């Protein structure tokens, strides 16, 4: 935990706000509780942001960057589309922690906020584009690749939801094997 002499960056505050969003949506982003969590005073916040809205915008931008195209770069570089799909599904499913909050799913409760819609759209678009490209490279027609990408992505989001709500969900390794078997064209 930082001490008062530790200088937090704007990114530290944005990441703390993302954690708050994961736990309780946009309503959970409040300066005083975040300052307590970070072990600093509100003055640290005001060194980086003028208000809560700026922090929320920064947190959503950080989430979209770190969970969209930037997070997919290594997978997009995998030449073999079957391997790319297996690795992508495995890492997504294995990252699912039982009963752990998800920023993506928490944001759905705030989907009417234009900032949330824009951030979710950026992340969804990056993920769907990579999945559709992968399915095209696996031999599906462009239309079928887009359709398969949507179904695969919906299943991934469903797995996140189950992990948040089902304490009896199978292990992440078992889910990764099943997801790969289901979504890799034969």
Image (spheres, rainbow, N blue to C red):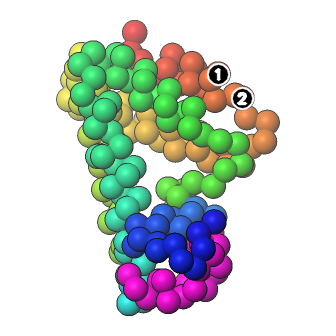
Crowding around mark 2 (Cα neighbors within 10 Å: few <14, some 14 to 19, many 20+) is: few
Q: Does residue 18 show up?
A: yes
Q: Is residue 34 magenta?
A: yes
Residue designated by label 1: 174
Secondary element at image label 2 = loop
Residue 80 rendering spot, x and y as whole percentages: 27, 15
Residue nearest the viewer, comparing 16 with 180: 16
Instruction: Decide: is 55 above or below 69.
Output: below
Measure how far apart labels 1 and 2 are at the Cα level: 6 Å
Crowding around mark 1 (Cα neighbors within 10 Å: few <14, some 14 to 19, many 20+) is: few
- State the residue lying farthest toward the front: 5
| The C terminus sits in image quarter | top left
Q: Does residue 147 show up?
A: no
Instruction: Decide: is 138 above or below 91.
Output: above
- State the residue lying farthest toward the top: 186
Q: What's the mark number on residue 15? A: none
Which quarter of the figure has residue 50?
bottom left
Principal SS element in the magenta part?
A: helix
Residue 116 rendering spot, x and y as whole percentages: 41, 69
Residue 70 rendering spot, x and y as whole percentages: 30, 46
Instruction: Decide: is 68 above or below 143.
Output: below
* Residue drawn where x is 50% and y is 89% of the image: 43
Residue designated by label 2: 170
| The N terminus sits in image quarter | bottom right
Which residues, given as a range, are shown in magenta?
Answer: 24-48
* Residue drawn where x is 64% and y is 22% of the image: 174
Q: Is residue 31 magenta?
A: yes
């Amino acid at each position: 935990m930082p001490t008062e002499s530790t200088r937090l960056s704007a990114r530290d505050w944005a990441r703390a706000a993302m954690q708050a969003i994961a736990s309780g949506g946009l309503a959970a982003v409040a300066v005083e509780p975040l300052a307590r969590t970070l072990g600093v005073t509100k003055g640290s916040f005001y060194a980086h942001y003028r208000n809560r809205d700026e922090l929320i915008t920064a947190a959503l931008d950080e989430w979209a960057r770190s969970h969209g195209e930037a997070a997919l770069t290594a997978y997009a570089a995998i030449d073999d589309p079957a391997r790319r799909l297996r690795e992508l599904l495995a890492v997504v499913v294995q990252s699912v922690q039982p009963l752990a909050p998800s920023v993506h799913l928490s944001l759905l409760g705030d989907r009417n906020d234009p900032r949330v819609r824009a951030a979710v759209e950026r992340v969804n678009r990056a993920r769907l584009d990579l999945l559709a490209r992968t399915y095209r490279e696996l031999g599906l027609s462009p239309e079928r690749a887009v359709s398969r990408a949507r179904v695969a992505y919906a299943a991934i989001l469903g797995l996140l939801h189950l992990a948040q709500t089902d304490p009896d969900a199978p292990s992440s390794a078992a889910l990764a094997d099943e997801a790969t078997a289901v979504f890799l064209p034969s």
